[in-house]
Image: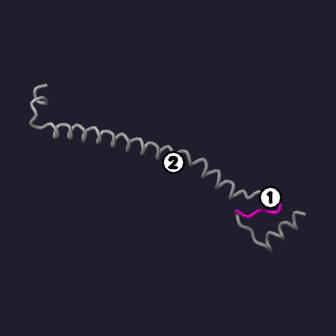
């Protein structure tokens, strides 16, 4: 039976991701998918950190702009400078 399989592979050609008659599971394709899954959370974690940093920067900028707006809106008013 082993010779038949070897002859079949030789006559039909094989690729790493093809199903082979003696396995039934595409090993190369399965390994590739598992590698992608294993790498996934790390990419998501880095993206989450970047978004958190961006959110902090936007919040700080918003606070500075609000303080500047308050100051410019109240320029020349005695109640602001005497407090």
Residue 21: say if magenta: yes
Q: Is residue 43 above or below residue 15?
A: above
Question: Badge 2 is on which residue?
Answer: 43
Residue 27: say if magenta: no
Q: Secondary structure at mark 2?
A: helix
Pick the residue in front: 81 or 34.
81
Instruction: Please state, as top left, top right, bottom left or bottom right, where the C terminus lies in the image.
Output: top left
Tag nearer the camera, 2 or 1: 2
Q: Residue furthest top?
A: 83
Tell me which corner region of the image, top left, top right, bottom left or bottom right, holds residue 31: bottom right
Q: Is residue 12 above or below residue 23?
A: below
Is the stretch drawn in magenta largely helix, strand or loop?
A: loop
Q: Residue at x 80, y 58 (%)?
A: 24
Give the magenta range.
Answer: 17-23
Pick the residue in front: 22 or 77.
77
Q: Residue furthest bottom?
A: 11
Tell me: 29 left or right of 67.
Answer: right
Q: Residue at x 16, y 40 (%)?
A: 72
- State the separation of the CA atoms marked 2 and 1: 32 Å
Colour theme? one colour
Instruction: Please state, as top left, top right, bottom left or bottom right, where the N terminus lies in the image.
Output: bottom right
Q: Secondary structure at mark 1?
A: loop
Q: Is residue 75 above or below residue 17?
A: above
Tell me which corner region of the image, top left, top right, bottom left or bottom right, holds residue 16: bottom right
The percent coordinates of residue 61 (x first, y second) are 28, 42
Question: Badge 1 is on which residue?
Answer: 24
Tell me: 56 left or right of 29.
Answer: left
The percent coordinates of residue 46 (x first, y second) are 47, 45
């Amino acid at each position: 039976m082993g010779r038949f399989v070897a002859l079949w592979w030789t006559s039909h050609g094989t690729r790493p991701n093809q199903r082979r008659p003696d396995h039934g599971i595409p090993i190369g394709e399965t390994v590739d998918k598992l590698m992608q899954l294993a790498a996934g959370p790390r990419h998501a974690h880095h993206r989450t950190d970047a978004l958190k940093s961006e959110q902090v920067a936007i919040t700080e900028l918003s606070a500075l702009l609000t303080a500047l707006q308050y100051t410019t809106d109240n320029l020349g008013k005695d109640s602001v400078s005497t407090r």
